[in-house]
Image (cartoon, grey):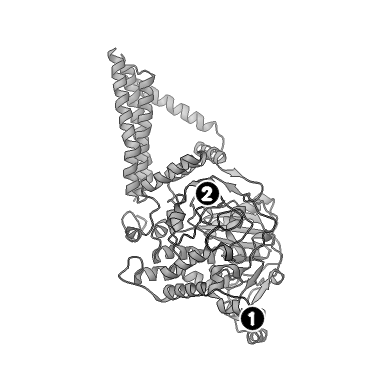
Amino acid sequence: MSNVNRRDFFKIGSLSAVVGASAIAALPKKAAANKLDKEITNNLVKIHDDFPAEVRDDYVPPRNWDHVQARSFFVDAVKAIGEDVEDDIVADGQAFVQKMNFAYDNSKAGYTQADKALFAGAWAMNNFAAGPSPAAIPDYGVNSWEQKTQKNPHALFDNDYVVKEKWKFKNKQEAANQIKRAAKLYGADLVGITRRDKRWDYSKFLNPVPPLARKAFAGPPTPEQLEEMKNWGPDKFVTDWSDFPFEPKTVIVMAFEMDYEGISASPSYVGSAAAGAGYSQMAETPYQLAVYLKNLGYNAVSAGNDMGLSVPYAIAAGIGENSRLGQIVSYKYGPRVRLAKVYTDFDFVEYDKPKSFGVMDFCKNCMRCADACPTKAISFDKEPSFEPTHKNKDKAWYNVKGVKKYHVDAKSCFKLWGELGDDCGMCMASCPYNKPDFWHHRLVDSVTAAMPGPVHDFMREMDKLFGYGNVEDKEAVKKFYNPKGRSYDGH
Amino acid sequence: MIFTGIEILFFVLGVITTLGIATTVYYHRKFKFNAGAWASIGIGLFLFVFTIAWSVSSVLEGEPRASSMGMIIFGIPSIILLVLGRKLALKNNRS
């Protein structure tokens, strides 16, 4: 029997320190933890050379008015160009707009005047700067297609024009690094770069807003602008890519994290405020990145939900993976992100590749989002399919057909928006990938990705048992406002 | 605050891990653990440290139920394993 005396203890401690220090020193220029983290990530994240979902030959890109919101909110314009609009989506859209703009109920948690004020402030920048972009309407406000070549003479400071000299990066990787760094600086949480893919662009664009009313006045209107306003009508509502000012070659995709506690309060105005804050960020950051590209000497147009389908573009740019709920699921934030894009003709850049980390496999067994959705708009199918399988599948003009994925019944989803007067978000709140940015969730996600299907069922049940993913939780609104554990003054 | 909760947590975890390993080595010298005792105490100690890490992280992220569940799912097995390891070590010492 022997004891560890003080000398032995120091010997063991010193030996451990020497071994540890040697191991770290043996990894030149790279921290041991970073290397280990990278190794684990490389083993769990699969990189694809091509778009990871199958796309059938008969796939046809949608028009922007195949978006349920565009069709509902701009019903008069859609009818004016000679197309029918179903009465139910018009009614749902009107109920949604009415409640979202004018209603609150001080007796209902999450829907009081204070919650409404929170929500109004959150959406304010989007409403001011990007207007109808969330409903897929392009060429409005900061997302203008205009590519000026000189400063506005009425403005003191104006950098929003394409400069004559083109900046040359040393190599494509440097270009990608600097563009991504700029996007991060301007507020993007995730950023990826992909080639422009016409499959994911809207084929035609409806925009009934007269050009003169699309941007804040930068000076007195010209006689041409006044003439255009006078002659504005349905024959000018629809444009296509032939009207676009340049041939885009690259799409930079950005993701913005939405507040975890806000989304957890879904459905409520607090949940909508979290989404609105994301939309306001979508109005700001892509515009800043577009101006950055213009100052490098290249054409650029920023876009939120307009111009093209953000989800496939984000998949192509390696930002995340497709999911049952139809939204991107990112590695770091799960589905709790908003997406935006910048279209540019700059193409001397290292493109990202699509990545997957087991989300679609997990979705096959999970179905928490489908369970949480009150109108059953989310598919319960085990496997993804090329065609929608939901109850409105025969007249689902709003679903893109020919892409193998889970098809969401957007009409049923929108019906709930009309009933609630907010943009729901229960699918996101219930998703097991929706977690705060804490180490133990990334650990669980990584373990899950490495495990086969039956383990996913177990993980789903454990997620519920541990109390995550609750929806319609009355306490969630209180938790959102609770000052406990927060530091507002930084101390 | 000077340190955030997560910084304090990982500092404390470091202290607990060091003390846990030192104590295990101390008792190994005293009782000469067999493979069963080593496995039981090693896994038990790891689970114990993981329980603290999980539960405190869950409290910090505002999910008290996840914290309580962490104590049940990881904490109870860790205690069982540590007690079993102790028994195995003492049994080995008596025989």
The amino acid type found where label 1 is placed reads Pro
Q: Secondary structure at mark 2?
A: loop
**Residue A428 seen anywhere in this rendered image of the structure:** yes
**Residue A216 seen anywhere in this rendered image of the structure:** no
Q: Image height check: is A234 above or below A26?
A: below
Q: Which mark is residue A126?
A: none
The amino acid type found where label 2 is placed reads Lys
Q: Which residue is mark 2?
A: A382
Q: Image height check: is A490 above or below B57?
A: below
The subunit carrying tag 2 is A
Q: How many marks?
A: 2
Question: Which sits in the foreground, A462 or A183?
Answer: A462
- Quadrant including the C terminus of chain A: bottom left
The subunit carrying tag 1 is A
Q: Secondary structure at mark 1?
A: helix
Choose top left, top right, bottom left or bottom right for residue A265. bottom left
Q: Which residue is mark 1?
A: A234
Question: Which sits in the foreground, A29 or A369?
Answer: A369
Horizontal and vertical percent position of residue A490:
37, 56
> Who's the residue at 40% across and 45% down the image?
A461
